[in-house]
Each structure stands twice: as C-alpha cells, then as structure tokens.
Amino acid sequence: MLKVSILGMEDGDHVIHASCPAESIPEMFPEFTGEVIFDGMVQKQGKRLIVNAHATCNAVLTCDVSGEDFEMMIEAPINKHFRLDTQLFNLQTEDDGDEILLSEDEEYIDITEEVRQELAIHLPMKRVSPNYVNVQFETLHPELLTKQSENTGEESPFAALKHLNIQKN
C-alpha cells in the first residue's frame, strides 16, 4: 500500500516518498514487477492538499515484432487534489472525480489506487523492444511473407466477390 502521512502537516510544501512491491497492490496488472516508487511534493493550503508527483515501476512486456520478453521502466505523473472536510465527507454520495474528500482526522492519504490506474494507463499500446525499434516485421520473419503472397489467388475468401457487377448511379 502506498500511503502518505498528513498527520500534523503544516501549510507549505512537503517532500513525499513511498514505495511498495507491485505484487502487494490489489488488481495490479501482471506486467508490473519489482518495486513501485512514488516521489513528489504535497502542497498544503488550509484544508486543501495538492499532490504533484510521479510513480515508476518496472514492467516485463512481450515485443510485438519479435515475440521476446523485455523490461521497460514505466513512469506516470500523479496530480491529485484532496480536501479535508469531515462534513462534506459524511454527506458524500458520489465520487466527484476532481477533488477527493477526506475526513479531517485522517492520518494518511492512500494513493495506491491512483498510482495503479496511472501506471496501467501509461503501459504502451505498441510494445516494441529497444533491440527491434528499427527492424521491420517482414525483415525479421520473411517466411510469413512468402506464405501470405502464395494465398493471393482464388483461395482468398473474398475471391468470389471480385466477379460481382455493381451498378453505380
């Protein structure tokens, strides 16, 4: 769990640091391994807390080009606003999204869920190992290219559609 102590925090800027194993975070994506590190600043202004930080964690990904596993450091910015207000906290019915309400007697801010979500969002959609960044798929797997070119005849499932006559108005 990633928690930041706010007990007795005075107004101003405060450096924060938290870390935990990726496996200890509930519903963490299986790609993440090792330690999740959270570093940044908390700015307290009265009953408002503004967290500006970044989270990092190592991920083991499978390369889309070669099929090999590789490691990549995933970094994600974390920018959240908290408000210490017991009355609003007790009346809260829905998640507002912009500002997270906390009770005034809270000792910690639990940022585990925010870090999990941000790291998951920052996983790359196209996963290419640094060893294969400038390598084309056809160069790496020419045997698949020849099989594809052999199947371009009447064996295609769309070959029958070539003979249709469509009149355009």
Image: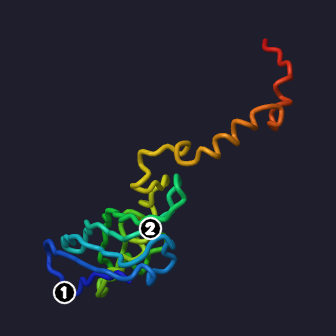
Q: Is residue 29 left or right of residue 85?
A: right
**Residue under the point 36% across and 71% down:** 57
Camera-near label (1 vs 2) is 2
* Residue 97: quarter of image: bottom left
Q: Is residue 58 left or right of residue 52?
A: right
* Residue 167: quarter of image: top right
**Residue under the point 35% across and 82% down:** 20
Asked whether residue 86 appears in the rendered view, the answer is no
Q: Secondary structure at mark 2?
A: helix
Residue 48 at x, y = what percent? 25, 71
Tag on residue 117?
Answer: 2
Inspect the image, locate mark 2, and give the three-letter code of the amino acid beneath it. Answer: Gln
Q: CA distance from mark 1 to mark 2?
A: 28 Å
Compared with 167, 114 (above or below) is below
**Residue under the point 51% across and 73% down:** 30
Q: Is residue 61 left or right of residue 36?
A: right
Tag on residue 141?
Answer: none
Q: Which residue is mark 1?
A: 8
What is the quadrant of the C terminus in the image? top right
What is the quadrant of the N terminus in the image? bottom left
Inspect the image, locate mark 1, and give the three-letter code of the amino acid beneath it. Answer: Gly
Q: Earlier in the sequence, mark 1 or mark 2?
A: 1
**Residue under the point 52% across and 55% down:** 66
- Of 126 and 167, nearer the camera is 126
- Of 96 and 43, nearer the camera is 43
Q: Residues within 10 Å of mark 1 (few under 14, many from 20)?
A: few
Compared with 147, 50 (above or below) is below
